[in-house]
Amino acid sequence: MKRTTATLTAILLIIILLIILLLIILVAAIKGSFSIHATKLTQSESKSLETKESANGPVSIAVTPRSLEEDLVAWDFAIVLDTHSEELTSDMVAVSELVDDEGKSYKPVSWEGSPPGGHHRSGVIKFNSVSPKPKSVELKVKSVGGVAERSFKWVL
């Protein structure tokens, strides 16, 4: 009798462990398929909004548009500046401008990020959204790292 009870208990524990294992695999598979679909959607939607980089001179700059929809109040561009040879002292609002496909220029409304100084800065530069939405935009950054002007362009 004790042997039968022990055997049944062992079988029951194995079944419970198998069910738990199957549930874990199922949850992982569901999460994996959702993230694959989300990645494909994000990549196809933002093909033209990839990070643009400029490594001219002693300062490298990388810019990534974060939100450029017409119905938004502000358009955001994430900016990363890196150097190993000079202080990054530029006022990012003063040295940046956005230009649309018709040549109209827009000044930034704010910089939210690292203050001037140091060798590594990052933040978000914000512009009022442009309406109607242009076919392309170009972010220009002037006089950083001895380079007169850097241009980062995206087709919308």
Image: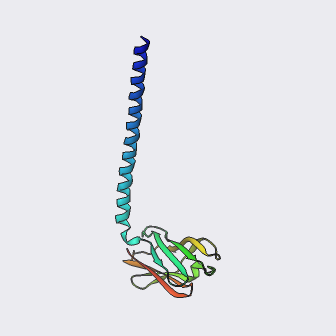
Between 54 and 44, the one nearer to me in the picture: 54
Residue 48, percent from left and from top: 37, 72
16 up-or-down from 155: above or below: above
36 vs 110, left or right, is left
How many marks are shown on the rendered structure? 0
Query: Is residue 110 shown left or right of residue 132?
Result: right
Whole-percent x and y of residue 53? Answer: 46, 77
Residue at the spot 44% in from the left edge and 84% down from the top edge: 104
Residue at (49% x, 74% y) in the render: 62
The image shows residue 126 at horizontal and vertical percentages of 53, 72
Q: What residue is drawn where x is 61% and y is 71%?
A: 114
- Quarter of the figure with the C terminus: bottom left
For the point 42% across and 85% down, which residue is it? 103
Rendered view: 43 above or below 2: below
Q: Which image quarter: residue 14?
A: top left
Q: Quadrant of the N terminus?
A: top left
